Image (cartoon, helix red, strand yellow):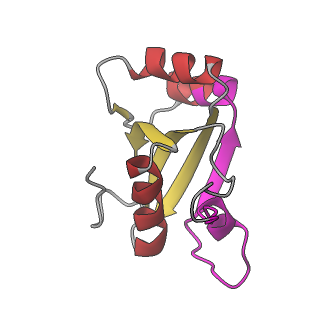
Amino acid sequence: MKIRTGFVSNSSASSFIVALSPTFGKPCSLCRRKSRLLELFHDGHYDYEANEIFSKGYDNALRELESSSRGWQATGHDSTARMYELHGLDWEIIHLRISYHDSVAHDMLEDEINCGNAEILFIGD
């Protein structure tokens, strides 16, 4: 997966619509490690102004896609169908924004994708 790290338009962050597996956030059965990705958005000691969870839920993400003037790009042939499929399998759908400068959050998201705990469905500015 490639995530932009430079500035695009006037924004200082990338927006993502991401599906999180039902096991996301639970400790790994082998190493007991737990993802801290979403904690980065709430931890006062680690604060990038541009990091934000805009909304949670399939319906909110779908409304955002339909009503936004943002240049959303699907990451698959039919990402809307994939979002519906994952929602039906109890994956949580979230719309989040990560600062271009926050390499830790970008790396953590990529780790979760590589482990099968997350899937990026749409990318926007």
The spot of residue 65 in percent (x, y) is 51, 27
Residue drawn at 38 percent across, 50 percent down: 114
Residue drawn at 61 percent across, 40 percent down: 94
| 105 up-or-down from 78: above or below | below
The spot of residue 29 in percent (x, y) is 63, 54
Residue drawn at 31 percent across, 26 percent down: 76
Residue 122's quadrant in the figure? top left
| 18 up-or-down from 65: above or below | below
Q: Considering depth in this image, is 72 or 17 the residue closer to the camera? A: 17
**Residue segment shown in magenta:** 32-61
Residue 18 showing in the rendered view: yes
Residue drawn at 64 percent across, 63 percent down: 34
The outermost residue toward the bottom is: 45
Would residue 37 be found to the left or right of residue 15 on screen? Answer: right
Based on the picture, tell me whether residue 57 belongs to the magenta stretch. yes
The spot of residue 111 in percent (x, y) is 42, 58
Residue 13's quadrant in the figure? bottom left
Residue 107's quadrant in the figure? bottom left
Would residue 23 be found to the left or right of residue 14 on screen? Answer: right
Q: Considering depth in this image, is 103 or 25 the residue closer to the camera? A: 25
Q: Considering depth in this image, is 118 or 120 the residue closer to the camera? A: 118
The spot of residue 51 in percent (x, y) is 57, 64
